[in-house]
């Protein structure tokens, strides 16, 4: 066991693999096992302990436990600020991930401030086209979208997408993330046909690159379904959202935020087509599904 703490790289690589392939709950289990053990052996503020805590926070957020992820990210960030300083790459990563957890919790104003600061520091230290800088730009755009600043978000996403296509390629998962976010921004601006075209492209690429049940692919299917609903293509929207809901429940679980959001979207389709019985059937086991998708 001591050797694992002396050389944690292979274990951390396995956690990164689990997160990259959408298996966040498995990543939580691994991190929850090794983080307290590392803390006991190396100390609470050892860089390896903080690394385990960071990945536990990231996995928790990705698995839907956003408040737990926020709490852990906050703690890791404070320790890294104290030990490593503001501009250290690990500190900037913690700040970025904390801001993303805040977005998931709806605290977009605070997230915007953190993402602005992180983007400025990363651009100064790493350059505008560095993958970490582009990640910060993409995330800042998400905070802007959450604040209703769709035109500003669109401009930033268009710039980030062009850079990611050039630096990473059109099929890279990060490029597809920005393309999907841009499609959501276009939908928010009312450019529904353009949003549909981009969502269809992203969904097709994610299915090929990541597989049908990857959380990112599921998210693309959800957003395309919402866009079809907004276009009043109710039959197409229903077909896609039903399939997506089944995948959500199987791959992510019934309480995951993505599952809840897809149920809300499907309920909106049923309400638009005057099918109250099917709305009631979906609402029966679920609380607080009051808002239709935007």
Image (cartoon, helix red, strand yellow):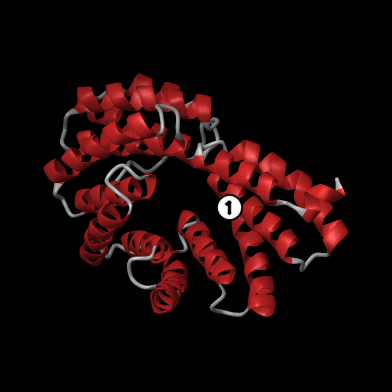
Is 165 rendered above or below residue 245? below
Residue that badge 1 annotates:
58
Residue 79 visible in image: yes
**How many dots with numbers?**
1
Q: What's the residue at 43%, 21% (across, down)?
A: 281
Question: Residue 61 placed where, x, y %?
Answer: 56, 50
Give the quarter of the image for residue 43. bottom right
Question: Residue 217 placed where, x, y %?
Answer: 38, 35
Is 241 rendered above or below residue 121? above
Residue 65 visible in image: no
Question: Residue 127 placed where, x, y %?
Answer: 37, 73
Q: What's the residue at 57%, 46% (across, down)?
A: 16
Question: Residue 63 placed where, x, y %?
Answer: 57, 42
Q: What's the residue at 65%, 48% (across, down)?
A: 12
Q: Is residue 201 left or right of residue 212?
A: left
Give the quarter of the image for residue 90. bottom right
Q: Is residue 81 left or right of residue 218?
A: right
Q: Is residue 150 left or right of residue 3?
A: left
Q: Nearer the viewer, residue 258 or 135?
A: 135
Q: Is residue 240 left or right of residue 20?
A: left
Q: Quadrant of the N terminus?
A: top right
Q: What's the residue at 21%, 22% (across, down)?
A: 235
């Amino acid at each position: 066991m001591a050797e694992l703490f002396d050389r944690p790289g292979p274990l951390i690589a396995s956690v990164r693999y689990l997160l990259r392939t959408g298996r966040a709950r498995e990543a939580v289990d691994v991190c929850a096992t090794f983080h307290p053990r590392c803390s006991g052996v190396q100390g609470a503020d050892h860089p390896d302990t903080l690394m385990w805590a960071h990945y536990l926070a990231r996995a928790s957020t990705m698995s839907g436990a956003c408040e737990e992820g926020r709490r852990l990210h906050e703690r890791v960030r404070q320790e890294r600020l104290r030990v490593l300083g503001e501009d250290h790459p690990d500190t900037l990563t913690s700040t970025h991930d904390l801001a993303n957890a805040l977005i998931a919790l709806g605290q977009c104003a605070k997230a915007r401030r953190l993402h602005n600061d992180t983007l400025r520091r990363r651009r100064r230290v790493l350059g505008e086209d560095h993958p970490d800088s582009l990640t910060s730009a993409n995330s800042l755009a998400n905070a802007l979208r959450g604040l209703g600043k769709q035109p500003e978000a669109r401009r930033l996403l268009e710039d980030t997408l062009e850079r990611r296509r050039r630096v990473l390629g059109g099929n890279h998962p990060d490029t597809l993330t920005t393309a999907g976010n841009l499609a959501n921004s276009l939908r928010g601006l009312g450019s529904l046909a353009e949003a549909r075209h981009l969502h269809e492209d992203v969904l097709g690429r994610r299915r090929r690159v990541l597989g049908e049940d990857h959380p990112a692919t599921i998210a693309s299917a959800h957003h395309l379904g919402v866009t079809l609903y907004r276009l009043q293509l109710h039959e197409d929207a229903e077909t896609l959202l039903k399939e997506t809901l089944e995948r959500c429940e199987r791959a992510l679980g019934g309480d995951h935020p993505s599952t809840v959001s897809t149920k809300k979207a499907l309920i909106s389709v049923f309400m638009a087509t005057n099918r109250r019985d099917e709305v009631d059937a979906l609402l029966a086991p679920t609380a607080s599904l009051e808002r239709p998708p935007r």
